[in-house]
Amino acid sequence: MTAGQILFNVVFYFFALLTILSASVVAFSRNILHSAFALLFTFWGVAGLYIFSDAQFLAAAQVLIYVGGILVLILFAIMLTHRNPREDSGQESNQSSSVILASGITVLVYIALLAVYLPVNWSGKAASYGTMTTEMLGTALTRNYLIPFEAVSMLLLAALLGAAYLARRK
Amino acid sequence: MYDIINYFVTNVKILQSIPFWMVQAAFMLAGCGAVLGVAALFAGVGSVVERNIAGRIQARYGPNRVGPWGWMQFLADGIKLVLKEDLIPDASAKMPFRLAPYFIFTVAFAAFIVVPFSQKLQIADLNIGILYIISVSSIVVIAILLAGWSSGNKWSLFGAMRSAAQIISYEVPVTITILAVIMMAGTMSMQEITAGQSGGIWRWFIFRYPLFTIPAFLVYYIASIAEVNRTPFDIPEAESELVAGYHTEYSSMRFAMFMMSEYVNVLAVSAIAVTMFLGGWQSPYPGHIFPGIWSNIEGLFWFFSKTFFLVFLMMWIRWTLPRYRVDQLMDLCWKVLLPVSFINLFGICAWMLLA
Amino acid sequence: MDLVFGKMLDNLIIIGAILFCLGIYTVITRRNAVGILMGVELMLNSANLNFVAFSKFRWGMPDGQVFVIFVIILAAAEAAVALAIILSIFHNFGDIDVDTKDLLKE
C-alpha cells in the first residue's frame, strides 16, 4: 500500500470511530449533558464521512444546521429543564427488563438491516457526474425538485410559527 | 499552498529525495503554525494597541511603561496570568469547564485556514470556503453555552444564554449578506472571490452596485461586531451588569484564552470582511508593481493594511459608543439589519440581472 | 478507493446501521424527553449517511444529496417544534420524565 492509501484509510477510520464512539456515549451515558456533547462529535464525524463521499456542501451544511442550530436548541432545552445538576435522577430506566428488551430490539434491527444489505451484489456503475459541485445541487433543487423545495420552505414557516406559539409563557 | 509546495520542490533539489506526502505535510504544518503565530501575536499586540487607543480617545495615556511605548505590556500580562492560581469552582461541572476555553480558541483559529493572505499564501483553498467559515463560526455558540453552564454560577448562565441568543440572531444578517457576495462572485471559494475583485478600487465588491453593496458591507460589519461580542454589543461581558458574564469563574490561563480568542475573532471577521467586500489582497490600482513572486509581498501588505484599518475601526467604535440593552440589541437585529439585508440581496440580484 | 476492510460503500452502510441501532436504543431507553430527541437525531443522521453513500457509490447522480438537504431541513423544523413542546411540558409539570407522563388526564 502506498503512503497515500495508508493516510486515506487512517483518516477514514478515524472519522468512523469518532462517529460510532460518540454515538455510543450518546446512547449509554447517564448524564444528559455528556450525551449532548457527544452528539456534537457525532455530527462532526458524520460531516467528515460526507466529505469522503464527495458531498462537501452537505458537510458544511450539516455542521452549520445540526451543530449551529439543532444542538444549540438541545443545549438550551437541557439547561432550561435541568432539575438536579449533580444528582443522578435516573436519566435512563434502571430496570434490567427494559434494558434487555432495548438491547434485544437493537440487535434484531441491526441483523435485519445487514440481512437486507449484504446479500445484494452492489457493484454497479461508478459515479457518473464527475466531481460534485454546489452548482449541480442548486440546479437539481431549482429544476427537478422545485416543488419539494417550496413545500419545505412553507413547512419551515409553519414550524417557526408553531414553535413560537407553543413555547410562549401564558 | 500547493503552488508554494510545487515551487519549493522544483527549485530546492534536496526536497525531491523526500517522499512528497512528507513534504506536503511538513509545509501544511508550517503554514498552520505560521498563521497560528501571526494570530496569537496579534491577540497580544492588539490588546496593548487597544488600550493605547482607548487611552487616547479618553484623553489619557495608555500603558507606556513596559518596553518601548508599552508594547511589551502583553508579555507582562501573559506572565501574570500564567502565574495566577487556576481556580476550579466546586459547583462546576469539571470536564466541560476545563474544555470550553480551548474550544473557543480552536474555533476562532479555524477560520484562518481559508483566508487568502496573498495570491499564493493561503493554507487551503476549499471550494466551499465561505460556507466553511460560516459553519465554523456557529460552533462558538456551543462553546459559550458550555462555558456558561459548567461554571455552576447563575450569572454565568445568564451571560452565556444572552451571548448565545445574540450570536445566533446576528448570524442571519451575516449569512444573507455573504449570500449576496457569493451571488456577485459566482463562487464560494475565497481566492476566487478575491480574484473577482481585481482591476482597481472601483471593481471591489463594495463599489460594484453602490446603492446596495455599501449598505451590505455596513450590515455585515455591524452584525459581525455583534458576533464577536464587542461593545456596543457586549451585554454578555458587561462589567457593570453581569460581573463578567460567561467567563466570571475563569482565572489565569483559561481567562487568557477567552481574551485571546476575542481578539483573534476580531481579526478573523475583519479579514473576512476585507476579503469579501474590500478586495482582499488586491491593491487599489490595477495590476501590481513588484514582478513575479514578489507581488505576494505586495498583496500581503495591502491585505494587512485593510484588515488593520477595520480592526482599528472596531476598537474606535468600542470606546466611543455606549452599550445596547438586550432588547434594543434584538430589535436592531430582527427589525433593522434583517430587512435591510433582504433588500440588499434582492437589489443586488435585480441589478445583476438587469445590467 | 478500496479500504482495508472492504469497499467504501460497505463501510459506510455498516456505520449507518450501527448509528441507527444506537439511535433506537437511545429512544427506547431514555427517560429524559430531550434524550429521546437526541436518539431521533442519530437515526436521521444514519439515514442521511445512507443516502449520501448510495448517491456517490452506486447511483451516480446527485439526487441523494438533494434528499439529504431536505432531511436536514425537516430535522431542524422537527427539533424546534419538539423542543417547544418539551418546554411547555416543563412549565406545566415541573419535569420532563416521560415515564411519569403516561396518562391523558391527570
Image (cartoon, coloured by chain):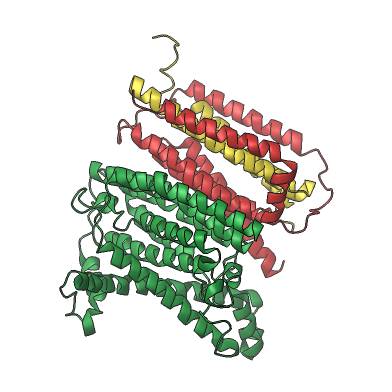
Chain colours: A red, B green, C yellow
Q: Is residue B143 above or below residue B274?
A: above
Q: Is residue B185 left or right of residue B321?
A: right
**x, y percent for residue A60:** 57, 53
Q: Is residue B255 left or right of residue C90?
A: left
**x, y percent for residue A59:** 59, 52
Identify the residue at the far top of this view: C105
Q: Quarter of the image containing the C terminus of chain B?
A: bottom right
Q: Nearer the viewer, residue A163 or A105?
A: A163
**x, y percent for residue B33:** 46, 73
Q: Is residue B49 above or below residue C26?
A: below
Q: Is residue A5 above or below residue C15?
A: below
Which residue is found at the position 49% from the left and 40% from the top?
A70
Which residue is found at the position 57% from the left and 31% from the top?
C24
What is the quadrant of residue A154 in the picture?
Answer: top right
Which residue is found at the position 78% from the left and 55% from the top?
A129
Which residue is found at the position 81% from the left and 54% from the top?
A128
Residue B255 visible here: yes
Q: Is residue C64 left or right of residue C97?
A: right
**x, y percent for residue A161:** 48, 30
Residue C16 visible here: no
Q: How many marks?
A: 0
Q: Quarter of the image containing the N terminus of chain B?
A: bottom right
Q: Is residue B85 above or below residue A119?
A: below
